[in-house]
Structures are given as C-alpha cells and as structure tokens.
Image (cartoon, grey):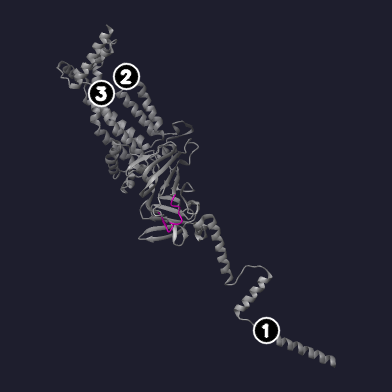
Amino acid sequence: MEEKKIDVQSIIGFLLIGAILIWMLYNNTPEEGAVEETKTEQVEDASPQPETSEQEPETRTVQDDSTALADAQRRLGAFGYSETLASAEGGITTIENDLLELKISNKGGYIEEARLKNYKTFDSIPVHLIKDGNASLNMNFTTTDGRTLNTENLYFEPELTENNGNQILSMKLKVSEDEYLEYRYAMRPGEYMLDFSIRSEGLTDVLNTSQNPVLNWKLKGYRHAKSISYENRYTELIYEYDGGDDDYLGQGSVEEDEDTNISYIAYKQHFFTSILLTDTPFTTSKFTSKNLVEDEEIDTVYTKEFASTIPLELKAGELNYNMNWYYGPTDYKILNDYDRNLDEIVPLGWGIFGWINKYLFIPFFAFLSGFLPSYGIAIIVMTIVVRILLSPVTYKSYLSQAKMKVLKPEINEINEKYKDNAMKKQQETMKLYSKAGASPMSGCLPALMQIPIFYALFQFFPSAFQLRQKSFLWADDLSSYDTIAELPFHIPFYGDHVSLFPILASIAIFIYMMMTTGQNMQASQQPGMPNMKFLMYLSPLIMLFFFNNYASGLSLYYFTSNLITIGIMLVIKYAIIDEDKIHAKIQENKKKPKKQNRFTRKFQEMMEQAEEQQKKQKK
C-alpha cells in the first residue's frame, strides 16, 4: 500500500515538474530576433560556418572590398579602383548599324571585333577587319606615383545610351566615380564613320605631366581576296600630314617612318580600310609596316602588319582629343564624300594620272554602270569610247610609220654611202626628213600622248571597288583573276591557275606589235636602239605572266583596247592611207624649197661646224 502511494506521488511529482518546466519555458521564450541571435551564437560556437545574420555579412563585405581595393591600389595606384568594379569581370558591348557591327571589350576599352555586314570574302566568309586579336589600341602612361600603366591591361566601365538613333558608348577607366579616363564611341545609322574621343576628367593629380601618354595602334591585315599576292600589292599604310600632304610606307617592310602634324592614319587592305582621324593633329607619329607574305603558298592568312606610335599631349594635366574611326570599303565615292582628303587613300595615280581618273574615268564609268546590264559591258563600252577618241592620235602615228616606210630605200642608200662617216650620215638623213616632211619623232609623240591615258586606266581598274565580286562571262570576280584551269603545281610569278583574259590580251598585243613594229623589222638595227624584234616577243610574254594574278577587269580592258586598236589600224591602212599617194607627196615636198625653222637651221650649222672640226683633226 505504501509502495503504491510512493509511485503515485512520484508520478504526480514528475507531472508537476513537467508543468513547471513548461511554464518556465513559456515565460522565458525570447522574441523572434533574439531566437535567431541565440541560434547564430550556438552555430558559431559549434563550428566556424559562414555568417548568416543581416549585419555581419555587410561588415564582412566591406572588409573584403577594402582588402581588394588596397591590393589593387598597391598594383595600379589610383587606377586600382577600376578593378573593384563589376566591369573588371570582363564583358563585351556591341554597337551596330545597318552597315557595321563593332564589339568593344571592357578590357582595354577597344574594339574586339569589327564586321562589315554587307560584304563577304572570296570564300564567302563575312569580312572582318578586326577579329581574334589581330588589332589593338593601347595607351601607355605614367602616374604621379611613378607607375607605368597600359590601358590594354585595365578595365573600363561601359555605359550605352541612344540619342536620336545614334548609339553612344562611354567606356570609363575610373579612379573614382567622378575621376576617369574615357573612350567615347558614337555610331550613326548608315555610316562607316563613327565619332571617337579620348578625354580625362579629374586626373590632373594622377597623370604625370612631365611625360605625355603614348597611343599605340596595331593591326594585322586579314586576307580577303583570292590572290593574296595581288591583294598585298595594294595593302599599305597611308597617312596625311602638314595640313593636306599624304605619304605611304610602300610594299616592303619599313622599320620606322616619322612625320609631324598627322591628321589621319589609314591601314589600307586593298578594298577595305581602317582609319584613325583626328581634329587636333598629332604633333608627331612613328609608323612601321611589315610584309607578312614571303611565300604566298605558306603565308595565306595575313598580308601586312601595321603599327603607329602616337604621343598625346596633356593640356592642363588632362587629355582631350576628338577623333573618328572609319571601318569600311576603300570606295572612292564613299571616302570622297567625307570631304577630309580620304580619296587620297585610293591609288588613282599621281599628278595628271590621278586627275584623269578623278575627273574623267570615275564619273564616266559610274555613268555607264548606272544603266548598262553588267560591269563587264561597261568596261568594254568605256574602252571603245576611249579608243575612238584616241583614233586621231593613232592615225598620226600610223601615218608617220607609213612615211618612214616609203623613205626606207633612200635612208638605206644614205647609210651605205656614208657608212664610214656617222656625222655626215646623220646630216643627210636629217636633210631627207626635212625635205620629205617626215620625222621619226612624229611617230613617237602620238604614242607618248597616250601614256597618261593608259597609265590612268592601269590605276583605275585595280582600284574600282564596284568591280569587286561582279561577274562577267567566265570571270566570277572582275576585281580578281579569272580561272579556266587549275594547275596541280605552282609556277613562280605565274601561279597555280590559268587565266583566259590575260592570254587573249597577250595575243592581241602581239598582233598589234606585228602590225606596227613588224613592218619595219627588216630595217638595220641602229646602235644604241632596242632590239624591236626582241621587244615584240617579250611584251606579250610579260603581260601573260604579269596579269595572270591581276584583276580580270584590267585584262579585259587591255584585250578590248588592243582589239579595237587593231581594227582602227586596219581601217586606216586599207581605207584611209594610200602609200603610193604618200610617196608622190613626199617627192613633191622634196622638190619644193623648204624653209627651215630657227632650231633646225641652228642644229644644221652645229653639225656642219662639227664636221669641219673633224676634218681639221684628221689633217
């Protein structure tokens, strides 16, 4: 009975203690925030797990940022701030219009990729002027704390906005939120040209004013055409200096060239060009060009490597340059429309040759190609017009040759009669020419008059951007060579293919030379004069080899030109010129007293005096 009582009491006691504990727990329950704090403390005591409270992580982040900033400033000085921003993780910003797409990298603030939307390479790949690290823009500068930094290793913070259809990208290399170095790009619709500026804000105490920053612009030109050697021939660095003069580095490797007051620098890749223009001329710049095509069978990716070193002037401790970038076609019309002397980038020839192209052939060809069904037909029509306009010159040249042919028997007699007296032979020959009204120079002068036209057209066709990838007959691209057969081997100076237009042009020029030179071939070779028979065979051979890799449009022009000239000469020979009448007229002229002009009379007197002097010396 007692045990049962104890047991009941024990149970009652247990229940009572449990009730007390429950009451105590109820009255000592902390508020929600206190519970979280208690749990946090217990977790911290158990193990060093990451903090989860609202206040502690914030403190920890501030400490991490401070450490990162201190570390970045140890390495980069004031510009360490830029490495603590989100943009330091890298990134690309794209700006584009209907013609051009540019991708600008946070690292370095320069263009990582430049793609022309409307053009393809010879193998149907989009034309890129910049891609896969072939170009760079780096500013090297020193700071007041003695550091030398390069922007290509630093991170810019991008901000893209739009204003009236213009895309504006601000890339800021920051020292603080209000102090920075800025690259600013502004792209307009429908243009290959974009605004570009370099300026600094609040860096007077950061940049070392005793040493100007130096801008280094480099680019390796990608191959875009079938013949890399032909494209490379028209790939070069061109720059404008001293308010309008222009110069270029040529085709070979140039280690360094320097000039002053530079207003633009162009890296021309035949039909495409990258240009840096500045409103404030660069006081001085140094340029280098390296030829990367030593063997066209091996070197098939790049043409040339260009580099420009441009010191920038600090004004009141700050930078402020307004410039432009141009990434687009080497099209004369597009470049000329900017009215900034960019047409000089297109190689139209110097002096009179360039004038003929600018004011005659370019407008006339644009007119013809505007309504004719193909560019090949436009070339043929323009060639026909040019040859017809030059036909009077051709007539005079052929007439002179006909006169010389009629006089040939008499000239041979003089040569035989005075074979031991060169001076007397020359005198008698000049007398015969004077009496007959003929002159060997009258045939040379018309030919010399045609040289500016021929050379201007020689420059025009390789530079005509509108011929690029335009087909005609069997040629799929009038700006490159045509192919009728592929060779299983490579012939030096000729290539690994056979082009038909150069073959036709070579045949035509051979026939033309036979008609003009061949008729006098039997004449005795004059001492010091070139062997005409040798030249007659050499010229077509040179054309055959030289033009096999040239633009088929140029070979089409030469073939058409020589074909038309042959036709004109046949008409002159068989329908206009009568050699019997020429002979009769020469005989009449010989009977008439010929009044000598002052120059001829003076020349003859000099010859006679020289002859008398020679006789005295012999005595």
In the image, residue 16 sits, relative to residue 439, either above or below, namely: below
Q: How crowded is mark 2: few (under 14 residues within 10 Å), some or many (20 or more)?
A: some
Main SS class of the magenta portion in the image: loop
Q: Is residue 352 left or right of residue 26?
A: left
At a point 74% along the width and 88% down the height, the residue shown is 15
Q: In which quarter of the image is the C terminus?
A: top left
Q: Which of 203 and 101 is in front in this view?
A: 203
Identify the disc placed on residue 25.
1
Q: Which x, y percent locates residue 40?
A: 64, 73
In the image, residue 358 sits, relative to residue 104, either above or below, namely: above
Q: Residues within 10 Å of mark 3 (few under 14, many from 20)?
A: few
- When asked about the image quadrant of residue 466, the answer is top left
Cα distance in 3D space between marks 3 and 2: 18 Å
Earlier residue among tags 1 and 3: 1
Does 150 lie within the magenta span? Answer: no
Cα distance in 3D space between marks 2 and 1: 130 Å
Identify the disc placed on residue 521.
2
Earlier residue among tags 2 and 1: 1
Q: Is residue 103 left or right of residue 377?
A: right
Cα distance in 3D space between marks 1 and 3: 128 Å
- When asked about the image quadrant of residue 453, the answer is top left
Residue with the most extreme bottom position:
1
Does 203 lie within the magenta span? Answer: yes
User: Which residue type does callout 3 highlight?
Assistant: Met
